């Protein structure tokens, strides 16, 4: 990242950590396939297994229940399947329940047919409608098969944190299986899959300062697993075929270690986020701050200012040397209305901007943001007076 720019888009992708870079470079020196039994292969395998332990520790799980993937989207497609197995016995997931504010990789339903996917709403703060979820779970005919529920732990746009423990208890009481998209939560709130935090977690390397193109599924066990999305060889205990991306996985493991240690510094990140929020409120008292009435991630600020369009504002910030987003960065660069804000019932969806920061965000980035926002508001006010 150029030193002259202020990078405020960590929820899209966090900068690569020095520890992750070093681990990747060390892994690139090992040429062997980690499935090979010779000494070189065993060296590569040790790197993969070490990273598996680190990722498991971040999730509060066991290394043997970690399956590496090419990213969170693949992990979601792997888990969101109607076809599962318990040992060799087939298990059928008859329905998938998701929230209307979930990330597109979950919202699109994975391998389920569209008519087998049910969306439950969220309230004005972005919290899943627990009454609607309970109604859907209670109304499911278990004779048709199990019900699978997939919910994000924390929203990628608003940062709103879901009551995952309550959701997990509700799903368990109704005999369902819970998949938790923990991509944004990892390294920002504690995760512990061993303590009633769902049956499976989805993680992504590049959201926590690791390399892009690596993700993981972490299960509370591997007794029941989906039919593999990628089949072939026996890698990852047969749950995900293909030669492991050793350098990417090594970088992921290093980033997971840093993320677990970094949980001690979330109060400092929250204080910096609050400073950004004060700038917005001071410069634009009519701004809407989304999710600020409930618990949010320490690093996320999602706001809208009347008369400020996301498309033009994002370009203006970019030209001023400030990198932020208008929500999810998963739409091929398109800027449009936020489905999250629509689900929350907010009409300002077209004009929302997201600031997402990291542990290294400081006063220089705050000042650059303040100057860029002030200049854009001056231009907005000038246009309004001219009109």
Image: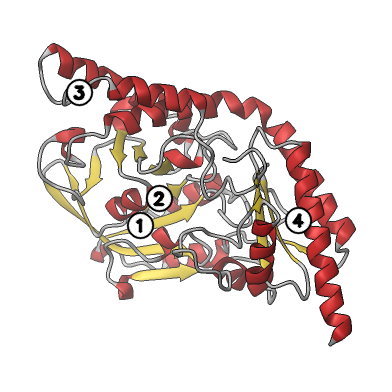
Alpha-carbon distance for marks 2 and 3?
38 Å
Alpha-carbon distance for marks 1 and 2?
6 Å
Location of residue 383 in the rendering, given as x and y in whole percent from the top left corner: 82, 79
- Chain-order first, disc 3 or disc 4: 3
- Chain-order first, disc 2 or disc 4: 2
The residue to which callout 3 is attached is 31
Callout in the foreground (3, 4) = 3
Instruction: Assign a secondary structure to mark 3.
Output: loop
Location of residue 17 in the rendering, given as x and y in whole percent from the top left corner: 51, 30
Q: Is residue 243 visible?
A: yes
Alpha-carbon distance for marks 3 and 4?
52 Å
Instruction: Assign a secondary structure to mark 1.
Output: strand
- Chain-order first, disc 2 or disc 3: 3
Colour scheme shown: secondary structure
Location of residue 367 in the rendering, given as x and y in whole percent from the top left corner: 80, 45
Of 366 and 92, nearer the camera is 366
Instruction: Assign a secondary structure to mark 4.
Output: loop
Callout in the foreground (2, 4) = 4
Q: Is residue 311 left or right of residue 294?
A: left
Asked if disc 1 and disc 2 are in contact, CB closer than 8 Å, the reply is yes
The residue to which callout 1 is attached is 148
Alpha-carbon distance for marks 4 and 1?
29 Å
Taking the spot 75% from the left edge, 51% from the top edge, the residue there is 369
The residue to which callout 4 is attached is 293
Asked if disc 2 and disc 3 are in contact, CB closer than 8 Å, the reply is no
- Chain-order first, disc 3 or disc 1: 3
Up the image or down, 207 lies above or below 37; here it is below
Quarter of image, res 55:
top left
The residue to which callout 2 is attached is 178
Crowding around mark 4 (Cα neighbors within 10 Å: few <14, some 14 to 19, many 20+) is: few
């Amino acid at each position: 990242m150029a030193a002259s720019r202020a990078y405020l888009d960590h929820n899209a992708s966090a900068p690569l950590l020095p520890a992750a870079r070093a681990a990747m470079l060390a892994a690139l020196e090992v040429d062997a396939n980690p499935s090979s039994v010779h000494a070189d292969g065993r060296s590569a395998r040790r790197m993969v297994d070490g990273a598996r332990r680190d990722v498991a520790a971040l999730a509060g799980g066991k290394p043997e229940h970690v399956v590496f993937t090419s990213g969170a989207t693949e992990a979601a497609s792997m888990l969101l399947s109607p076809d599962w197995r318990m040992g060799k016995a087939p298990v059928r997931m008859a329905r998938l329940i998701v929230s209307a504010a979930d990330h597109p990789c979950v919202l699109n339903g994975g391998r389920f047919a569209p008519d087998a996917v049910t969306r439950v709403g969220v309230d004005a703060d972005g919290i899943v409608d627990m009454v609607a979820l309970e109604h859907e779970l209670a109304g499911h005919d278990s004779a048709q098969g199990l019900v699978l529920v997939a919910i994000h732990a924390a929203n990628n746009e608003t940062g709103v944190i879901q009551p995952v423990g309550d959701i997990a208890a509700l799903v368990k009481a109704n005999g369902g299986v819970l998949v938790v998209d923990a991509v944004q939560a990892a390294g920002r709130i504690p995760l512990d899959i061993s303590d009633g935090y769902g049956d499976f977690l989805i993680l992504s390397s590049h959201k926590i300062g690791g390399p892009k193109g690596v993700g993981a599924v972490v299960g509370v066990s591997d007794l029941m697993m989906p039919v593999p999305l990628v089949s072939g060889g026996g890698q990852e205990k047969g749950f995900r075929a293909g030669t492991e991306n050793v350098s990417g996985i090594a970088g992921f493991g290093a980033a997971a270690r840093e993320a677990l240690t970094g949980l001690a510094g979330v109060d400092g990140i929250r204080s910096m986020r609050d400073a950004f929020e004060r700038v917005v409120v001071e410069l634009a008292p009519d701004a809407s701050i989304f999710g600020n009435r409930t618990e949010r991630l320490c690093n996320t600020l999602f706001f809208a200012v009347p008369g400020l369009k996301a498309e033009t504002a994002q370009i203006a910030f970019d030209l001023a040397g400030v990198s932020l987003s208008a929500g999810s960065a998963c739409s091929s660069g398109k800027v449009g209305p936020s489905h999250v804000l629509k689900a929350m019932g907010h009409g300002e969806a077209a004009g929302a901007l997201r600031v997402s920061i990291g542990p290294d965000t400081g006063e220089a980035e705050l000042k650059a943001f303040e100057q860029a926002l002030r200049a854009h508001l001056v231009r907005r006010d000038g246009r309004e007076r001219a009109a």
